[in-house]
Image: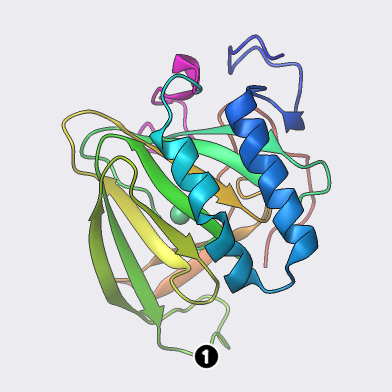
Amino acid sequence: MCDHSPHDHHTDFGFIVDVPEIRALIEETQRLTTAMSSHAERVKALRPAFSRLLATDGWLPDAFAQPDRTSAMGGGIGQYALYRASDGSLCLFSLVVPAGASTPVHDHLAWGLVGVYRGVQQDTTYDRLDDGSDAGRADLRVASQQVVSRGGFYTLLPPEGDIHYVSTVSDTPSVSIHLLANDTACVWRHRFDPDAGTVAAFRSGYSNVKCAATPDLGP
Ligand SMILES: [Fe+2]
């Protein structure tokens, strides 16, 4: 059992927050990963278990629901690993976005589910119009905007809906819960500047665990 202090951790993998509610979701994800080869079918089958976690109070320690003023992502955004598979195949984390702050426009490069646990977020997704042949350029167009409140969630099935940003539109920080089929904060992915039409390698990092050092500067 973790001591629930995110900055004084001893476990970098496995159940960093070891509570029955998280174990239930991870075990259901592992069961469905074995049982289903289709990402779309698996994500659909996970909806009840994910919805249950979002609807349940009391399992997220307060320390994992705080902004992080030292955030590598900027804006005081906290990203706290709750569970990390040691093989990089799955993670669960909380994302804390202070009132009025926004994430960079980014991608995830993995299937998953993202839902709001506290506060209210606005989710803006983009379509990518170019073919990706220029590593530094990306032509994006807003595809959708939605306001997501407690219990609301959406799914990620790359490339569909994989490029987005979220903003907190409540007066209090928003806390969202992310279940993704990679080690999201430690893999090299992309951040985009839609106005400039540029894209760059991006590794957000967690607020509570360190990513392994890597000479890889990203895709
Ligand atoms: Fe995201």
Q: Which residues are magenta?
A: 60-76
Q: Amino acid at mark 1?
A: Asp
The percent coordinates of residue 127 (x first, y second) are 38, 79
Please tell me in which quadrant of the rendered image residue 25 appears. top right
* Residue at 30 percent of width and 40 percent of height: 150
The percent coordinates of residue 112 (x first, y second) are 56, 58
From the image, give the main secondary structure of the stretch colored magenta: loop
Q: Is residue 67 shown in magenta?
A: yes
Which residue is denoted by mark 1 in the rendering? 131
Rendered position, 193 above or below 217: below
Q: Nearer the viewer, residue 145 or 139?
A: 145
The percent coordinates of residue 15 (x first, y second) are 71, 28
- Which quadrant holds the N terminus? top right
* Residue at 43 percent of width and 25 percent of height: 68
- Position of 119 with respect to 110 (left or right) is left
Secondary structure of the residue carrying tag 1 is: loop
Please tell me in which quadrant of the rendered image residue 81 appears. top right
